[in-house]
Image (tube, rainbow, N blue to C red):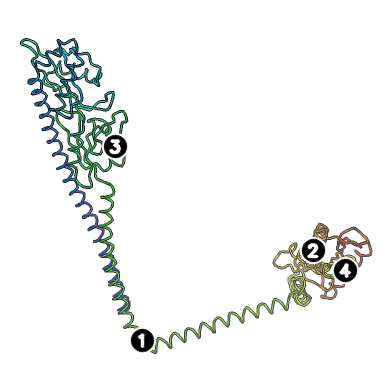
């Protein structure tokens, strides 16, 4: 291995090591970012849970104080015949003291209603009152959002003395606007805080972006949001979990930033490595100087000689093929036929094997040319030549144009009987070509006549004798009416 290759290999190994290191660095940075976001989410969720506890406790104290301050008014409400007016007055006072309050009702300690409610107080509120009556400590009644006739609210209840020996349950319904404001205030940039129903599949009860809760249009965390939940904190004495969800765009942007920085660093190292390799290569090329140019010239010259040799061999092969092929039909010509017949006859005599020859003539071909023209005649010769050649595909067989409208086929190893069968097959093949002959004395299409001559295993014949016998058999086929095959008979 040359010094340059060693240096290049070391640079590649160094770049691979840098690439692997950058992958670990990217993963570590992304993990560090996620851990930092988890800490932010934990802090936001816990602060929200603590603030909600203070807010709920403050609401309970305020409800108790409002009842104490207005005990006489509540007694008057219960004893008044015009409860609607007295109730409206109390509700106005309640909303001045607690702006998020939207309605109230009274029930006795057993949970039985003391007021006829036609406001937004519904079945869920009454169920909460009954649960509270059985558990005044409030353990069985968890704070939760539920729907009303207009929107949604949550209930604060207290067991308070309404007279000397009589207690009453006061229920005040509150909007969730203040809680939504707290969520909006405490959520960090790139994070969203939700209050979800504990034990549900991410059912959202309160969100920072929806201060007016439309509970009849239920919304749950999507699968994408669920996959991005960073932390969850349960709010004691409520049916709520505080959920912190990281923003996908922020997470995606941070990942892209980390990956982009790593990519830029890798590109810088890669560029440095390429520059170093280029400098080493340039120095090596300068040392080579003239020897490199001479080597290149030598290779070019050898390539040119090799290409010209290949081209010359191809041209010679084409010339050889042209010298042995008929110019019109493309099959073997008379010269090729004479050479092959002499060679195959010597082999047959040497090995005492049979040899057969077919001499084929197109019937009334001169009349065909006179009737349709020489161009159509040439086309007919091509079709018949190709049909004959396709019929004889054995390696030793040879189909050739003998001259004019005559063709000849050499069949090494074929007896006279076998050759006559093959002659009949080729005659039928030409017959099926159905080349229309407008002036034939036999049929309405072009036909052929065939003469067959054979050399037996115990015979001796010359090429001329074999050709003459085939010609004699052909003459017999013509004299018998053409469009037939005959074998030579001594």
> Badge 2 is on which residue?
415
Give the mark nearer the N terminus: 1 vs 2. Answer: 1
Q: Residue furthest left?
A: 164
Q: Identify the mark nearer the N-term, 3 or 4.
A: 3
Q: Pick the quarter of the image with the C terminus.
A: bottom right
Q: Which residue is mark 1?
A: 288
Question: Where's residue 344, x and y in %?
Answer: 75, 72
Whether residue 490 is visible: no
Above or below for 477 versus 96: below
The CA span between labels 4 and 1 is 74 Å
Identify the secondary structure beneath mark 2.
Answer: loop
In the picture, measured across the screen, residue 319 lies left or right of residue 60, that is: right
CA neighbours of label 2 inside 10 A, class few (<14), some (14 to 19), many (20+): some
Give how far apart the Cα atoms at labels 1 and 2 are: 73 Å
Q: Compared with residue 100, is residue 320 higher up or lower down, i.e. above or below? A: below
The residue indicated by pointer 3 is 221
Q: Residue furthest bottom?
A: 290
**What's the CA distance linking mark 2 and mark 3?**
93 Å
Kindly identify which residue carries mark 4.
369
Q: Residue at the location (62% across, 80% down)?
A: 313
Q: Earlier in the sequence, mark 2 or mark 3?
A: 3
């Amino acid at each position: 291995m040359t010094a340059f290759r060693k240096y290049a290999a070391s640079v590649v190994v160094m770049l691979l090591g840098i690439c692997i290191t950058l992958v670990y660095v990217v993963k570590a940075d992304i993990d560090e970012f996620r851990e930092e976001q988890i800490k932010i989410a934990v802090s936001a969720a816990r602060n929200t849970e603590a603030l909600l506890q203070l807010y709920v406790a403050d609401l309970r104290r305020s409800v108790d104080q409002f009842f104490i301050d207005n005990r006489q008014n509540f007694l008057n409400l219960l004893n008044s015949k015009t409860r609607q007016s007295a109730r409206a007055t109390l509700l106005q006072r309640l909303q001045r003291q607690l702006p998020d309050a939207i309605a109230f009702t009274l029930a006795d300690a057993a949970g039985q209603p003391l007021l006829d409610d036609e406001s937004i107080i519904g079945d869920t509120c009454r169920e909460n009152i009954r649960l509270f009556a059985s558990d005044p400590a409030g353990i069985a009644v968890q704070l939760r959002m539920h729907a009303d006739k207009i929107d949604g609210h949550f209930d604060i209840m207290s067991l308070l003395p309404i007279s000397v020996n009589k207690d009453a349950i006061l229920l005040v319904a509150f909007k969730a606007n203040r809680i939504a404001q707290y969520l909006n205030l405490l959520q960090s940039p790139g994070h969203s805080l939700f209050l979800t129903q504990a034990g549900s599949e991410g059912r959202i009860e309160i969100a920072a972006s929806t201060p007016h809760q439309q509970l009849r249009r239920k919304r749950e965390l999507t699968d994408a949001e669920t996959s991005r939940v960073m932390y969850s904190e349960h709010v004691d004495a409520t049916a709520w979990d505080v959920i912190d969800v990281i923003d996908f765009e922020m997470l995606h942007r941070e990942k892209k930033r980390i990956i982009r920085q790593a990519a830029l660093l890798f590109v810088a190292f890669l560029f440095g490595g390429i520059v170093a390799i280029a400098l080493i290569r340039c120095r090596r090329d300068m040392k080579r100087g003239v020897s490199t140019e001479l080597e290149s010239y030598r290779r070019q010259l050898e390539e040119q000689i090799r290409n010209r040799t290949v081209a010359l061999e191809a041209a010679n092969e084409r010339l050889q093929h042209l010298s042995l092929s008929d110019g019109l039909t493309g099959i073997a010509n008379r010269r090729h036929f004479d050479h092959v017949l002499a060679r195959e006859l010597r082999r047959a005599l040497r090995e005492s094997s049979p040899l057969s020859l077919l001499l084929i003539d197109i019937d009334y071909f001169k009349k065909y040319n006179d009737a349709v023209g020489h161009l159509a005649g040439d086309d007919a010769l091509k079709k018949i030549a190709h049909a004959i050649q396709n019929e004889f595909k054995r390696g030793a067989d040879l189909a050739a144009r003998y001259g004019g409208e005559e063709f000849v086929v050499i069949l090494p190893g074929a007896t006279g009987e076998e050759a006559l069968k093959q002659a009949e097959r080729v005659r039928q093949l030409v017959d099926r070509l159905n080349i229309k002959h407008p002036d034939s004395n036999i049929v309405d299409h072009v036909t052929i006549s065939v003469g067959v001559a054979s050399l037996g295993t115990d015979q001796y014949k010359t090429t001329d004798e074999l050709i003459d016998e085939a010609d004699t058999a052909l003459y017999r086929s013509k004299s018998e009416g053409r469009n037939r095959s005959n074998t030579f008979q001594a």
